[in-house]
Image (cartoon, coloured by chain):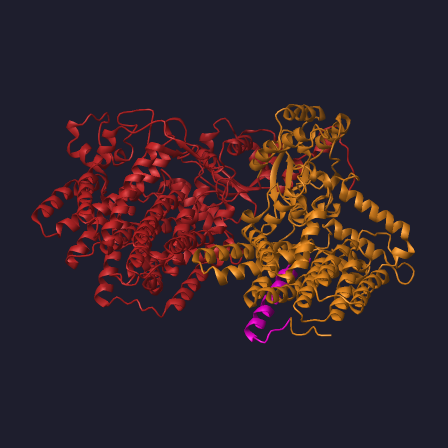
Chain colours: A orange, B red
């Protein structure tokens, strides 16, 4: 079995460059790993950590939470020394994510080097190291980073297999092991099997002996999955129900507030727009260029990843839920393609203009990633707002919070209430108006509702007017402060309202604080909503919000 | 006997000047590297670049949150210059002792002259001086960039503030008070503007005796710094024959002509450098002038290098982009003007290559342009990230200046332009690089005069002032270019072989030189007590109050409160002088900076309520809302609120300064907190979900 030599180069300068970039990438991923001060603001991570903390040895090794593979619960728990402290487990999960996301760097570099030479390899390392979404996912104790690493490894294995540098046995077993680990983390990783499958088909003519190794690889993956996910066998019903429920959210048949943002989104276009934004435009175009280049060159070595990417997009782009984390497995493929394309351009075009443009695109991409990483070292705006309100409130004030993400303990001795939005009908709005009228402070923790509900006029006819009147200060509550996690150049690189909400609401939301200026009766508030609702639009809310401090 | 204060002023001035010399000397190797073959070896350009670089480095790092602008700015600036020197130390830039002495003597003379112009009327009140001093003082107090807006507490400056941050850095570096820094920086701008014009003019004067070149450069500099426009000539020397409706000529008359004399519904501004220095205006267009002139010098270097067959020098392009970016963050119109000039230069270069069938000409020039743009953007990316533009697009001009008024303003360009046209016609196939470049500068000047007749930028200036700002910013540069082009044409024709050319040069020089008559109207006598750096004499009895406030400490997010007022009033003076944020300063200025009246309207209502209300709870709520820690009660406040007795404020504040009926109160948070009633108790119907 031959696998050595692909992560190492005989050229010390190249190896040193990849090492430096890997360390740099790790630095970006490890910076501000406790960005929420243990508050578990990332809801997927919070679910995962809660389930992990619920595990007990030897009595309770099968969790009651099956949205993620059990390995994603066990590993952080083990890394945390089997601690039951959520903050410790969360930190361990994030460290695992950061390490996996770091490992993608040399793996992608090796893949790109095999496909396009040393320049491509170094570029791939740079792009992966500084990729803003990969940096962000590394800060969440979820499975995106591991899944990304799985795809990167499978891609590398397929490239070196098709290049004749690893035999079928090695290829099948390593792919089985990598795929099995991915599957153990998340069942949806099953689709990654497309990469080795296509590589098998494209590889040397299959014999029965070859097929045997292929089956062995698949069996190894399945064995790893089952060994680390006993719930599949021991709690089949729960497991199936969780998968069905998750599937319902993905397809849109289960109504949850966090998928309301996708109402009216065009399949495919929405996702491509997100990819364009997340890859800062230029690198996305380079990745598309790489797609076309490899297809044009009929380079079989890249074909498994191209088929996977195409199939993955075909499947996921049709889903109702369009969270950007679903796009994570595409990133190693896209970045390797982009790196190969750029290297090819530099080598063949010999154009000053092309070189300058590509350098500009890379510089912007790197700046975005570094800026994102620095942002995690800044104070979390939800904690900042709690400190601000506590410092300015009387201690007897009532603080209403929309989307309660900070524990009330952080608001001192003030009374903290969760604002019951959205109000679907008049009666609910009346209750909301009562609460607002009795509040001294109102905190909006993210754009989850105000940027989404106004578009859903049929379902929430009054909420547009509610937010417009609120931002205009017509509830007697004056907008007094806005808190943001502001890394350098944030305004240049922060996604706009067209961006999928989770690109900002988890780790870098904009938090608005309103302070009571004049007393208002609930009836006044209702009148203000009724008056605002007529000429209301999201644009009007954005304009009113722009005037808020 | 010289007073001790005057000696202290001299020491501060000397310290400032030494830093200026050092910054120029340290940047000299870089200037030499990017301007090979220039007569001064880049030494004069280095003065402009060093002055920019020393403040840009700490500004950039403070914007990125790496260092504190207030605490570490000067040290970081010096370290940045040291790195710059180390990087380019191999490019020896010593121009020889004789030249060096001459250059420094010229610079020193200009600096002294600029200081005399400024200190002849040293008070920092009137026109935009409060704004400029406020930006400077706010930057000096700031850790991060952009600095806090001294006239809208809780917000950062939303204006082209980079030049003011530079002035603040220089003030900190020299260790002088903000008002002294203002005066010294104005003198610096005066000297750098003169040096910039001198350098560009002498660089463009290719042939002829060295003395004539130097004289031409000096005359061009003097014209830019002291002369008016043709209006200044006609409406002074020939006033009886004009139809002026104004009683007498004032220095501002030549800057407020179209729309004012005679009065029409299209009021415009045609200011020029001499007027700016006369009134001591340190606004963006004045602050950006040295950078603008440096950009023109660099564009000339780009042009000369390429036409000389050396192609594009990437470092030169990068520095050009960086300097252009600084112009954008200091005075946005300059970026547009330089963009237009760069487009002229690049187009001419590309056309030349095309006709000469140069290989890969398009690729080369597009790459050069892109590199310049990228460097420009990268150099001021933090500014772009923090700034919200307040222009609402470009509108077609529906009113136009009468041709006779344009002729009155710019007629002195006619003969030099004609001479230039003849030169181009005679040498159209063998035109020297200098001739073509000056032709492009003349084209730019004419375009800048013509553009406001076609389009204008839509900002908050409305109705009869809608074209005013656009014409102001464009004609400001056009008038500078007119002197430059005129000086070059007169020099070139004057040193030509033919008698006709020399006679034409002499005739063309007459109206241009006649504009120096303007200096007779701006000259001021030496102030009683001599020249002093103190710029706060206008405060009178309030000076002690302002001094007391400046010694108070404000935590992040805290503010002072004083009477706000309309733009150009004497209100908001404490925040302007100290840089401490107040709830609202000049109303119309915030209207412009916040792109609408909503925010300043709300703030004005709050300030009125705090000073005028008898409801202590409401006042406390607003004081808390705006983070007010200190409240100013003095003559301005009594004038603004004649009905108020301020008893509520006195009841909730503790005096930290009192003298002659003036006072500063510190808000007693505990007393205020006790007065405030939670809304849950005040309003019925609360649905409280316990936390």
Percent position (x, y) of residue A323?
70, 46
Q: Is residue A409 left or right of residue B353?
A: right
- Say if A349 sits above or below A501 in the image: below
Spot the residue most to the left. Answer: B499
Secondary structure, magenta segment, majority class: helix
Q: Is residue B502 left or right of residue B72?
A: left
Whether residue B193 appears in this view of the structure is yes
Instruction: Report if residue B293 lies within the magenta region.
Output: no
- Say if B24 sits above or below A462 in the image: below
Viewer-proximal residue among B173 and B54: B54
Percent position (x, y) of residue B379?
45, 54
Q: Can you tell which quarter of the image residue A539 is in? A: top right
Q: Pick the quarter of the image with the C terminus of chain B.
A: top right
Percent position (x, y) of residue B341?
33, 47
Q: Residue at the spot x=73%, y=35% of the render?
A: A421
- The number of numbered discs placed on residues in the rendered structure image is 0
Instruction: Report if residue A30 lies within the magenta region.
Output: yes
- Say if B143 sits above or below A388 in the image: below
| Residue bounds of the magenta highlight | A7-35
Q: Residue at the spot x=62%, y=49% of the render?
A: A275
Percent position (x, y) of residue B5?
32, 53
Viewer-proximal residue among B612 and A34: A34
Q: Is residue B122 left or right of residue A326?
A: left
Q: Pick the quarter of the image with the N terminus of chain B.
A: bottom left
Q: Can you tell which quarter of the image residue B89 is in? A: bottom left
Whether residue B564 appears in this view of the structure is no
Viewer-proximal residue among B85 and A351: A351
């Amino acid at each position: 079995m031959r696998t050595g030599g692909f992560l190492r180069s005989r050229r010390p300068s190249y190896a040193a460059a990849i090492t430096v970039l890997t360390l740099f990438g790790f630095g970006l991923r490890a910076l501000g790993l406790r960005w929420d001060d243990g508050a578990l603001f990332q809801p997927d991570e919070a679910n995962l950590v809660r389930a992990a903390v619920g595990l007990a040895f030897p009595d309770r090794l099968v969790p009651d939470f099956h949205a993620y593979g059990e390995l994603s619960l066990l590993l952080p728990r083990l890394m945390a020394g089997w601690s039951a402290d959520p903050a410790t487990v969360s930190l361990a999960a994030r460290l695992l994510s950061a390490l996996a996301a770091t490992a993608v760097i040399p793996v992608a570099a090796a893949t790109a080097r095999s496909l396009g030479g040393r320049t491509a390899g170094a570029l791939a390392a740079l792009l992966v190291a500084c990729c803003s979404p990969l940096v962000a996912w590394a800060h969440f104790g979820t499975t995106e980073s591991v899944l990304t690493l799985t795809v990167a490894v499978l891609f590398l294995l397929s490239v070196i297999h098709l290049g004749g540098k690893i035999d079928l046995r090695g290829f099948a077993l390593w792919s089985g092991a990598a795929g099995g680990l991915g599957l153990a983390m998340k069942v949806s990783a099953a689709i990654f099997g497309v990469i080795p499958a296509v590589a098998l088909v494209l590889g040397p003519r299959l014999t029965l002996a070859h097929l045997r190794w292929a089956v062995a690889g698949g069996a190894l993956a399945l064995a790893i999955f089952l060994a680390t996910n006993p719930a599949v066998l021991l709690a089949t019903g729960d497991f199936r129900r969780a998968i069905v429920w998750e599937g319902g959210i993905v397809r849109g048949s289960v109504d949850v507030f966090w998928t309301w943002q996708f109402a009216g989104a065009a399949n495919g276009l929405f996702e491509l727009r997100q990819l364009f934004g997340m890859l800062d435009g230029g690198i996305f175009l380079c990745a598309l260029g790489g797609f076309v280049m490899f297809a044009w060159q009929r380079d079989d070595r890249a074909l498994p990843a191209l088929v996977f990417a195409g199939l993955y997009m075909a499947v996921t782009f049709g889903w109702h839920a369009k969270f950007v984390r679903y796009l994570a497995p595409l990133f190693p493929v896209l970045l390797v393609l982009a790196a190969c394309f750029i290297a090819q351009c530099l080598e063949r075009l010999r154009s000053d203009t092309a070189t300058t443009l590509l350098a500009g695109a890379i510089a912007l991409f790197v700046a975005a990633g570094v800026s994102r990483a620095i942002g995690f070292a800044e104070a979390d705006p939800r904690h900042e707002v709690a400190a601000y309100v506590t410092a300015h409130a009387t201690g007897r004030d009532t603080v209403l919070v929309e989307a309660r993400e900070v524990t009330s303990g952080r608001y001192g001795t003030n009374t903290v209430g969760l604002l019951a939005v959205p109000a679907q009908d008049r009666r609910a709005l009346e209750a909301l108006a009562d609460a607002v009228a009795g509040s001294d402070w109102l905190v909006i923790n993210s754009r989850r509702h105000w940027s989404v509900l106004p578009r859903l006029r049929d379902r929430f006819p009054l909420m547009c007017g509610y937010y417009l009147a609120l931002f205009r200060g017509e509830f007697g509550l004056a907008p007094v402060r806005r808190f943001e996690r502001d890394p350098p150049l944030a305004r240049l690189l922060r996604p706009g309202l067209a961006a999928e909400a989770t690109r900002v609401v988890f780790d870098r939301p904009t938090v608005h604080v309103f302070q009571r200026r004049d007393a208002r009766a609930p009836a006044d508030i209702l009148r203000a909503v009724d008056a605002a609702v007529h000429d209301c639009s999201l644009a009007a809310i954005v304009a009113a919000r722009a005037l808020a401090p | 006997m010289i007073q001790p204060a005057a000696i202290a002023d001299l020491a501060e001035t000397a310290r400032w000047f030494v830093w200026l010399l050092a910054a120029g000397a340290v940047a000299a190797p870089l200037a030499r590297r990017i301007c090979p073959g220039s007569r001064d070896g880049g030494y004069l350009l280095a003065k402009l670049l060093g002055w920019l670089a020393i403040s840009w480095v700490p500004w950039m790092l403070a914007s990125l949150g790496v260092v504190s602008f207030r605490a570490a700015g000067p040290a970081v600036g010096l370290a940045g210059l040291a790195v710059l020197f180390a990087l380019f130390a191999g490019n020896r830039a010593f121009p020889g002792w004789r030249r060096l002495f001459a250059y420094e003597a010229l610079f020193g003379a200009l600096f002294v002259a600029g200081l005399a112009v400024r200190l002849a009327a040293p008070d920092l009140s009137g026109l935009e001086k409060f704004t400029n001093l406020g930006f400077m003082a706010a930057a000096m107090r700031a850790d991060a960039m952009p600095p806090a807006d001294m006239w809208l507490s809780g917000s950062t400056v939303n204006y082209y503030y980079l030049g003011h941050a530079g002035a603040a850095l220089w003030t900190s570096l020299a260790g002088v008070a903000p008002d002294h820094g203002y005066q010294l920086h104005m003198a610096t701008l005066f000297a750098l503007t003169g040096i910039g014009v001198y350098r560009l003019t002498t660089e463009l004067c290719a042939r002829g005796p060295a003395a004539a070149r130097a004289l031409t450069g000096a005359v061009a500099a003097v014209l830019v710094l002291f002369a008016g426009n043709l209006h200044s000539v006609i409406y002074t020397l020939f006033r009886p024959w004009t139809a002026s409706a104004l009683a007498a000529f004032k220095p501002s008359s030549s800057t407020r002509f179209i729309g004012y004399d005679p009065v029409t519904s299209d009021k415009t501004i045609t200011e020029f450098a001499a007027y700016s220095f006369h009134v001591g205006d340190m606004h963006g267009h004045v602050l950006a002038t040295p950078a603008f002139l440096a950009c023109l010098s660099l564009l000339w270097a780009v042009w000369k290098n390429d036409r000389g067959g050396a192609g594009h020098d990437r470092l030169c392009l990068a520095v050009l982009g960086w300097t252009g970016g600084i112009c954008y963050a200091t005075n946005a119109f300059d970026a547009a003007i330089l963009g237009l000039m760069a487009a002229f230069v690049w187009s001419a270069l590309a056309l030349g290559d095309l006709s000469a069938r140069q290989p890969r000409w398009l690729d080369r020039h597009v790459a050069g342009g892109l590199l310049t743009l990228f460097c420009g953007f990268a150099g001021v990316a933090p500014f772009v990230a923090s700034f919200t533009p307040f222009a609402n697009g470009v509108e077609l001009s529906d009113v136009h200046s009468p041709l006779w008024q344009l002729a009155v303003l710019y007629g002195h360009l006619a003969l030099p332009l004609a001479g230039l046209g003849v030169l181009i016609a005679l040498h159209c196939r063998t035109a020297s690089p200098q001739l073509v470049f000056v032709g492009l500068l003349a084209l730019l000047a004419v375009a800048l005069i013509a553009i406001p007749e076609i389009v204008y930028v839509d900002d908050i200036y409305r109705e009869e002032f809608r074209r005013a700002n656009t014409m102001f910013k464009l004609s400001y540069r056009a008038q500078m270019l007119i002197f430059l082009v005129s000086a070059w044409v007169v020099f070139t024709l004057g040193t030509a072989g033919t008698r006709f050319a020399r006679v034409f040069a002499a005739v063309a020089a007459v109206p241009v030189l006649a504009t120096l008559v303007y200096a007779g109207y701006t000259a001021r006598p030496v102030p009683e007590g001599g020249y002093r750096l103190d710029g706060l004499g206008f405060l009178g009895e309030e000076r002690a109050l302002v001094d007391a406030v400046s010694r108070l400490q404000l935590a992040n997010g805290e503010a002072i409160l004083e009477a706000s007022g309309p733009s150009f009033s004497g209100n908001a003076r404490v925040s302007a002088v100290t840089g401490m944020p107040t709830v609202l300063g000049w109303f119309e200025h915030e209207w412009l900076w916040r792109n609408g009246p909503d925010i300043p309207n709300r703030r004005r209502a709050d300030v009125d309520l705090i000073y005028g209300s008898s409801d202590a709870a409401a006042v406390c709520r607003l004081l808390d809302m705006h983070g007010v820690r200190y409240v100013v009660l003095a003559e301005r406040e009594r004038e603004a609120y004649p009905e108020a007795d301020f008893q509520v404020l006195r009841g909730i504040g503790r005096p930290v300064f009192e003298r002659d009926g003036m006072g500063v109160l510190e808000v007693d948070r505990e007393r205020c907190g006790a007065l405030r009633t939670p809304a849950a108790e005040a309003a019925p119907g609360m649905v409280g979900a316990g936390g």
